Amino acid sequence: MKKVIALLLCGAFIGAVSAADIPPLKKAMTSKVVGGEIDGLMDEDGLTVLELKGTTKEGKGNKYLNFNIDLPEAVDLTGKALVIRAKTDTPDVLTGFYFRAFNEGNTKSPALSYNTWTRFLTNDYVDILVIPGENGQLKWEKEVVSGDAPNAVKTLQFHIGTPKESAEMNLKVKSVKVIDDPRETFKAAVAGMGEFKAIAKSRFAATAPTRAEMLDGVATILTDARSLENAKQFNQYEGMAIAFDQPVNLVGKTIKFDYKATGATTALYIRFFDAVGKKAVVSFMSKGGVAKDWTPVELKIGGDSDKFTWQANEVSGAEATALTTVDFIFCTPTKAADFGLQVRNLRAE
């Protein structure tokens, strides 16, 4: 159910990481384990990885495991964001993921609360960026939070869930860090093309807005959806649009990026629009299927490449001198299937 577009950042985190605000995790910091047990694992980086593990019960409905991390001292997260590094060894079981933060003295109503019911955790660590009051890779739970500023956070809480019965499930949390300026982490996302300004739903996407995460210097833009089982049209489309801070001139330049398709994806389109935006100024479509491994692409306006076809009938005829948005669109004819795309290192040379 996960569609992914990743843009390679030029460098690691741009925003300052205040690691000292939240100390390295230790097994002794955990409390209130519900439905499972906590283990402390030594990671190759010398950090203690906290593992929540257990076997779900029988019966209908979702089953949950959860645990708390009690910080040695309360921290003020007002105006800041967190980056949670986590993974699971049971990605086929773990579906629900919740993160909540409670101010000291209030363990009933969280100051921060997020969740997702998509299988985004994998066997590899991912960095989950959470910004107070905003949807990101996790959905902001406005109806759950207390409304108080997170100015004295003392307890962090993790929940995992699944509808599967009698199934082993685990979560490994490696670190929780504070980001002083979350906006800065994405500023260089398309540094080779122009400064990244905003993300929006593609003009051709069937579902809603995209979300963002970071891992090891890679900004990843995600949108959750599943090809519709009862859709009338032949192909199901998803995508995202990236707006630039300043108009981009691509005349005489080569458009470059790396991509790989996931799941049932069968085609990829890349389209650039100017401020008028009604019809693309630049439009290419993949030919001969899509690659399932990382594949470099080089495109010149007005011509075909070995992997993409220039779509003369899709463009407005305007010069590519002031492009404001790029759309990545991908599709599948397969009903009720996961399909996706990853794109990185977008640039113009």
Image (cartoon, rainbow, N blue to C red):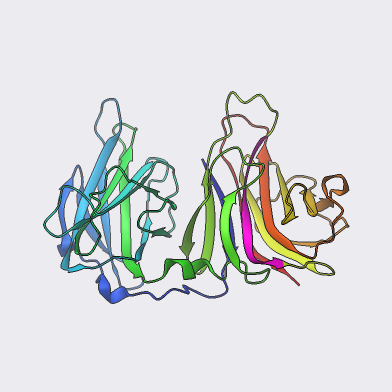
**Number of labelled discs?**
0
Residue 221 in percent (x, y) is at 54, 55
Query: Where is residue 345, by image quadrant?
Result: bottom right
Q: Residue 331 magenta-drawn? A: no
Which residue appears at 65% of the width and 58% of the height?
Answer: 294
> Can you say whether 264 is above or below 217 in the image?
above
Residue 83 in percent (x, y) is at 37, 63
Nearest the viewer among 316 and 186 is 316
> Can you say whether 19 is above or below 319 in the image?
below
* 221 on left or right of 30: right
Asked whether residue 55 appears in the rendered view, the answer is no
Query: Where is residue 119, by image quadrant?
Result: top left
Nearest the viewer among 323 and 166 is 323
Magenta residues, start to end:
236-247
How would you classify the magenta stretch by its main secondary structure?
A: strand
* 231 on left or right of 116: right
